[in-house]
Image (spheres, grey):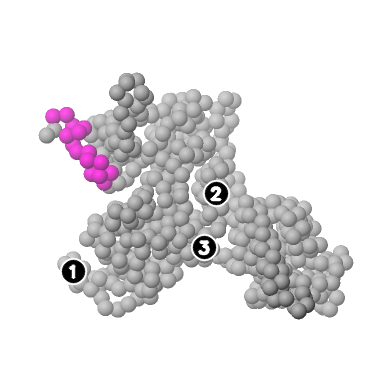
Amino acid sequence: MSKFSDPNAEMMKRLQEMQKEQFIISHLTKELSTIMDSKQLQLVLNKSFKTELRFNDFIIIKDYKQSVEILSSWVENQNCIIDNQLDIYVKNCLDSAEPLLFDLKELSLLPSYFTKAKDSEMRMVIGLGLPGINESKNVIFLFYRNFISFNDIPERILNGISTQLSITLHNINVHEQLIALKGNIQNFPKEIGEVKKSGYGFQGIVGQSEVMQHIFEQISQVAPSQSNVIIFGETGTGKELIAQAIHELSEFSGKKMIRINCAAIPANLIESELFGHEKGSFTGATEQRKGKFEQAHNSTIFLDEIGELPLELQTRLLRVLQEKEIERIGGNKRIRVNVRIITATNRNLEKEVAEGRFRSDLFYRLNVFPVHLPALRERKEDIPLLANYFLEKLYPKTFKKIKGFSQKIVKMMIANPWLGNIRELENMIERSMLTAKGDIIREMDFPKVIDYQNTDQDFQVKTLQEFEKEYILKIIEKCNGRIFGETGAARLLGLPPTTLISKMQKLGIEKKHYFKGTE
């Protein structure tokens, strides 16, 4: 048998080609995922893309909110505005699931960008419509001077990178809007020796650290899909902001994201909150009510503190995930719902599953795309950026125009453990703004942290729960036993009062521990 007809050799050759294509897709997707402006995109397309796809030039037609633009290598660092109507070639690409091939020598009534390419001795054009995100419609055209045929189109590579390219274009649009918005914010005066303000971050999430850049990349990857996302992180780390960013970058961004905190609603009411009820289905049900899942139809529902959901309701939630249907309490009608589910928890759900407090089948249904949000103490390089951001955010609330922080306070903020994370930082800065005597914060009342250094030979190793219990007790004592209100422990710790009370119950903290003389 001839080696040219050996099926094993042909299969091996094809596998090698597929591996090479997958490597190219992975390489190009990684480069696209870090791009936030048009200049960076032009640079990557003119280098990495040209090297891998061997085209001579490119243009991208961007139709965002009915404003049509051209991004090309011909225009340096700017976009060229064209007519607000998409031509037939762009529409054909948008309607096609596959890349299209055009021969410029055989076409008549060319749009201006094709005419310019033809004048530059381009012969063939590959056009690809990219997946739409929100209101954006994008097409990329690759130009070739030499003749190519349909067999030469790198179809699998183009389809493989098309979603990430579309996400990148959307991120550029959002980033440009953020820059325009920041341009309207009044600049604060500068002072030598003081920490200054800088850029914010991604989709309203403040952070420039390496760990947060990884989070931003994860958001960009999962947002365009309808996959379930679960966000792990301590209380106060900003889990709801991550959920909102995913929603805003999804196809559901035109509708409101529905939120529910599973820890803040009594167990006997949460079923009605989630699934709704019919009139007369129980005492007090005086009218029909739609639940959160019905309200979130064709949108996103965010279930915060999912680890607090009672076991019996976990079964009903699992049924919604499996069947995409709900039943109101007291009803017998199944209602179809198309909902993207994002959950969040500060618990170790794998441990909860092992100890029988959380259903394993529900956990695996929710844990499709996990996002692990770091504690503030794990991203300390972001603390000055966050602190200055809060100065601007809190100005309308405090009416105190503060320019920045002394270097001493910045160092103290970085050294502080921030057990309440970003929420605790925000509350501390608000209090410091109110008590500041000048336009620079030079004093901050940090909670006292117990020093557990080994000063005695009988040093005892303590669990994290013991550390947390003692820290919370110190804060409550500092607040004279007050939990609620502006001067309460919950405010100081950056926790909702209901969450703090729940933590106290789990840690066995009672009034007698912080009120002397209480039995």
Disc 2 to disc 1: CB gap under 8 Å: no
Quick one: label 1, few (<14), some, or many (20+) residues within 10 Å?
Answer: few
The residue labelled by disc 1 is: 282
Indicate the position of residue 429 as horizontal and vertical percent values.
42, 35
Residue type beneath disc 3: Ser
Residue type beneath disc 1: Phe
The residue labelled by disc 2 is: 214
Query: Can you name the residue that lies furthest to the left here?
Result: 519
Task: Please report the residue visible at 42 percent of the width from the left and 59 percent of the height from the top.
Answer: 367
Q: Quadrant of the N terminus?
A: bottom right
Q: Which segment is the magenta one?
A: 501-517
Q: Can see residue 61?
A: no
Task: Please report the residue visible at 84 percent of the width from the left and 72 percent of the height from the top.
Answer: 147
Spatial CA distance of label 2 from label 1 is: 48 Å
Indicate the position of residue 338 as horizontal and vertical percent values.
42, 71
Tell me which numbered mark, 2 or 1, is placed earlier along the sequence.
Answer: 2
Quick one: label 2, few (<14), some, or many (20+) residues within 10 Å?
Answer: some
The residue labelled by disc 3 is: 250
Query: Can you name the residue that lies furthest to the front here?
Result: 1
